[in-house]
Image (cartoon, grey):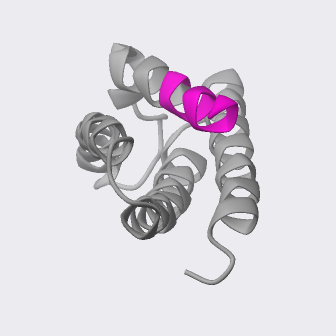
Amino acid sequence: MIRLSAGLALIVALAAAPVLAQGRAGAPADCQRDLFQNEAGMRRELTRLQSAGTTDQATQCRVWREHVTFLQGARSVFATCQAGRQREENVAQMDSSISEYRVLLANRCKAR
């Protein structure tokens, strides 16, 4: 549960950060929209992960796999649309969460 809690903490931190929607100068035109969608997606993911906490193992495994897919997409948006320290921090947070959820999946969802 520690790994899941760390992932939830990350999502809360990212969803609460209004600076996420600030794109970098010279970024593709869709970046502003993509960053706002990332922020909204983080909130949705938090709700999904919290709801999955009381479900059966197979459902949790499915939600965690889908969450990894979401995190990979969010990472791509941060990598494309942000610059400097903000980009470095958000990409690193996504990488860390992806890694944590992969370990969680490997340990708890081997045959699922």
**42 shown above or below 99:** above
Whether the magenta-drawn stretch holds residue 7 is answered as yes
Depth check, front residue: 49 or 87 = 49
| Residue in the image at 24% along x and 42% along y | 44
Q: Residue farthest to the front? A: 56
Give the position of the C terminus as an image quadrant.
bottom right
Quadrant of res 2: top right
Residue 1 location, x and y as percent?
A: 62, 34
Where residue 71 appears, x then y in whole percent? 51, 54
Residue in the image at 72% along x and 33% along y? 88
Residue 33 coordinates in the image, percent (x, y): 23, 46
Q: Main secondary structure of the magenta part?
A: helix
Can you tell which quarter of the image residue 63 is in?
Answer: bottom left
Relative to the observer, which residue lies in front, 8 or 15? 8
Q: Measuring 54% from the left and 53% from the top, which residue is drawn there?
A: 80
Q: How many marks?
A: 0
**Up-down: is 111 above or below 4?**
below
Q: Position of residue 97 (x, y in %)?
A: 65, 43
Residue shown at the point (40%, 16%) measured from the top left: 17
The residue segment tinted magenta is 1-9
**8 within the magenta span:** yes
